[in-house]
Image: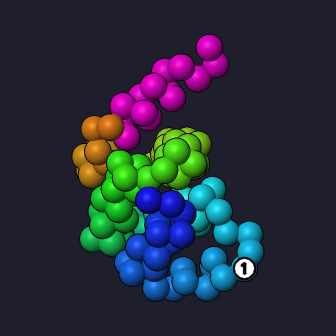
């Protein structure tokens, strides 16, 4: 799966994002950054139903995506998880992480624990 396919699948869930990628600057990083920003808003607004669908879709992109899409997810979405959940209750944070695949949780842990080494 490449970024164009990911963008199409994201707009099925969140049609409002369709206009975000009409210009020529769309690429894997831009697509994942916009999707990550949208997920952050959902976390802040406690929009759990749509949030969990989006987290599942992010897992699917990571599992089936090409190398560039996977790198974008690791360097954008995973990197932002701490910041996105910083002000959540511990219970809500655990619920969010329970909807992230074990594979992405492993990437998150590797990134957090290797930071600064």
The magenta stretch spans residue 111? yes
Indicate how the structure is coloured in the image: rainbow
| Residue 27 place in picture, x, y as percent | 65, 63
The magenta stretch spans residue 6? no
Please state if 27 lies on the left or on the right of 36 as rendered: right
Please state if 1 lies on the left or on the right of 25 as rendered: left
Q: Residue at x 35, y 62 (%)?
A: 57
Which portion, as a residue range, is magenta?
Answer: 104-117
Residue 66 seen anywhere in this rendered image of the structure? yes
- Read off the residue under disc 1: 23
| Residue 2 place in picture, x, y as percent | 51, 60
Classify residue 117 by image quadrant.
Answer: top right
Q: Is residue 80 above or below residue 47?
A: above
Classify residue 23 by image quadrant.
Answer: bottom right
Secondary structure that dominates the magenta span: helix
Residue 89 seen anywhere in this rendered image of the structure? no
| Residue 81 place in picture, x, y as percent | 48, 46
Residue furthest out toward the right: 24
Please state if 32 lies on the left or on the right of 61 as rendered: right
In front of the other: 59 or 48: 59
């Amino acid at each position: 799966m490449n970024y164009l396919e990911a963008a199409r699948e994201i707009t099925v869930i969140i049609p409002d994002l369709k206009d975000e990628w009409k210009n020529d600057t769309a690429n894997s990083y831009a697509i994942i950054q916009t999707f990550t920003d949208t997920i952050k808003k959902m976390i802040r607004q406690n929009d759990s139903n749509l949030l969990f669908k989006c987290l599942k879709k992010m897992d699917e992109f990571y599992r089936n995506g090409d190398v560039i899409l996977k790198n974008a997810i690791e360097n954008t979405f995973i990197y932002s998880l701490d910041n996105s959940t910083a002000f959540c209750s511990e219970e809500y944070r655990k619920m969010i992480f329970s909807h992230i695949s074990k594979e992405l949780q492993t990437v998150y842990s590797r990134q957090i624990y290797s930071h600064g080494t």
